[in-house]
């Protein structure tokens, strides 16, 4: 009898961002545009870095990988959320729910560690400039990209181990727009207090350890350049401002959700939207607005593929074939 009850739940109901039917079309339009902007902005950075030989450096290699992870972070749940705005019953299968849990912790964990890799790159560039190209070799750059994915995989596997065997036999409503682990475990038919603590400890350890490593790294960098010329200090601050801003935007919501897990669900929804939508869309803006090399490369890319008269010629050709 218990086995029958435990196998009863085959899907979960996602309550989404709002129950208001009037808001659904508006939210569909807004988040569709935001998701499109995420894809265009991050793909543009990847294309710019790969197409311009002047950007074939460790810093921009890591930046392109950050853009790729941002696309992954935004894509594991956002397309379904957008599609759910058009349907009344927002359901997700049990397997798809586990897949979302796997993806969110894989991508979020990988991005945390990748930000540490980017901090290490800035440390070597600013504190050991004469040895930069020797230390940041191609092999080291590849390792600095592979380690975040390995850590993210270990992290998400450990998180799923807490969940995959939990019995779900009753409530199946997840008060969010995707299957987040703390919300899903609350629906199990057994007392999940210990499991919830282990989940929070796991995510909290990764979040806090990565954040502390970043704080220490940037503190050491600023301390090292303090005794140098004001021009060097200004350049270092300008370089680090973008990195530190991204760190705060990403780690703020993650730490609040997992290290302070007793916040209200409405707050969790806002923070979940922030790190799955707004952080991936802000990263390209932050890095390009303050980076003359990236802006110059984008201008070159624009002039190369959008030459004067090329767009107007394409439009005229389209109009010609439509009227024909």
Image: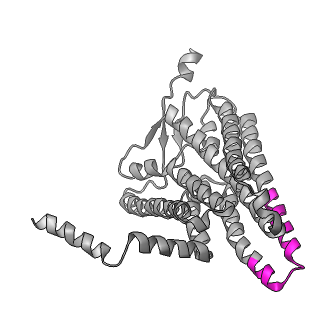
Q: Residue at x 54, y 66 (%)?
A: 52
- Nearer to me, 27 or 135: 135
Q: Residue furthest top?
A: 1
Asked which quadrant contains residue 2, the reply is: top right
Q: Which residues are magenta?
A: 212-235
- Can the viewer see residue 94? no
Q: Residue furthest bottom?
A: 230
- Image quadrant where one finds the N terminus: top right
Where residue 299 appears, x then y in whole percent?
A: 49, 75
Where residue 290 appears, x then y in whole percent?
A: 62, 76
Q: Is residue 136 left or right of residue 66?
A: right
Q: Residue at x 54, y 76 (%)?
A: 296
Where residue 261 appears, x then y in whole percent?
A: 71, 50
- Nearer to me, 136 or 268: 136
Q: Residue at x 55, y 75 (%)?
A: 295
Give the colouring mode of the picture.
one colour
Is-magenta flag for residue 87?
no
Q: Is residue 104 left or right of residue 47?
A: right
Where residue 59 appears, x then y in whole percent?
A: 68, 63
Asked which quadrant contains residue 188, the reply is: top right
Q: Residue at x 88, y 72 (%)?
A: 224
Q: Is residue 162 left or right of residue 302?
A: right
Q: Is residue 138 above or below residue 13?
A: below
Q: Residue furthest right?
A: 227
- Can the viewer see residue 140? yes
Q: Is residue 149 left or right of residue 222?
A: left
Is-magenta flag for residue 213?
yes
Magenta segment main secondary structure: helix
């Amino acid at each position: 009898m218990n086995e029958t009850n435990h196998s009863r739940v085959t899907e979960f109901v996602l309550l989404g961002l709002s129950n208001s039917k009037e808001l659904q079309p508006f939210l569909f339009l807004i988040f569709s545009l935001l998701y499109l902007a995420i894809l265009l902005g991050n793909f543009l950075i990847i294309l710019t870095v790969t197409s311009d030989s002047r950007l074939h450096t460790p810093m921009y290699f890591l930046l392109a990988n950050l853009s790729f992870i941002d696309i992954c972070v935004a894509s594991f749940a956002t397309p379904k959320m957008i599609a759910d705005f058009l349907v009344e019953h927002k359901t997700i299968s049990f397997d798809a729910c586990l897949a979302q849990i796997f993806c969110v912790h894989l991508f979020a964990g990988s991005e945390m560690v990748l930000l540490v890799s980017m901090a290490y790159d800035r440390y070597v560039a600013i504190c050991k400039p004469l040895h930069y190209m020797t230390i940041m070799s191609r092999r080291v750059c590849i390792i600095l990209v592979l380690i975040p994915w390995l850590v993210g995989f270990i992290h998400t596997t450990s998180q799923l181990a807490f969940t995959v065997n939990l019995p779900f036999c009753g409530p199946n409503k997840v008060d969010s727009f995707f299957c987040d682990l703390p919300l899903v475990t609350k629906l199990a038919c057994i007392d999940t207090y210990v499991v919830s603590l282990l989940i929070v400890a796991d995510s909290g350890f990764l979040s806090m350890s990565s954040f502390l490593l970043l704080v220490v790294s940037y503190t050491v960098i600023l301390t090292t350049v303090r005794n140098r010329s004001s021009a060097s200090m200004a350049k270092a601050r300008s370089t680090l401002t973008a990195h530190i801003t991204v760190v705060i935007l990403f780690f703020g919501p993650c730490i609040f959700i997992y290290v302070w897990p007793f916040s209200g669900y409405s707050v969790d929804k806002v923070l979940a939207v922030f790190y799955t939508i707004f952080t991936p869309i802000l990263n390209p803006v932050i890095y390009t607005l303050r980076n003359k090399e990236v802006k110059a490369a984008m201008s070159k890319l624009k002039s190369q593929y959008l030459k004067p008269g090329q767009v107007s010629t394409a439009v005229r050709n389209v109009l010609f074939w439509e009227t024909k």
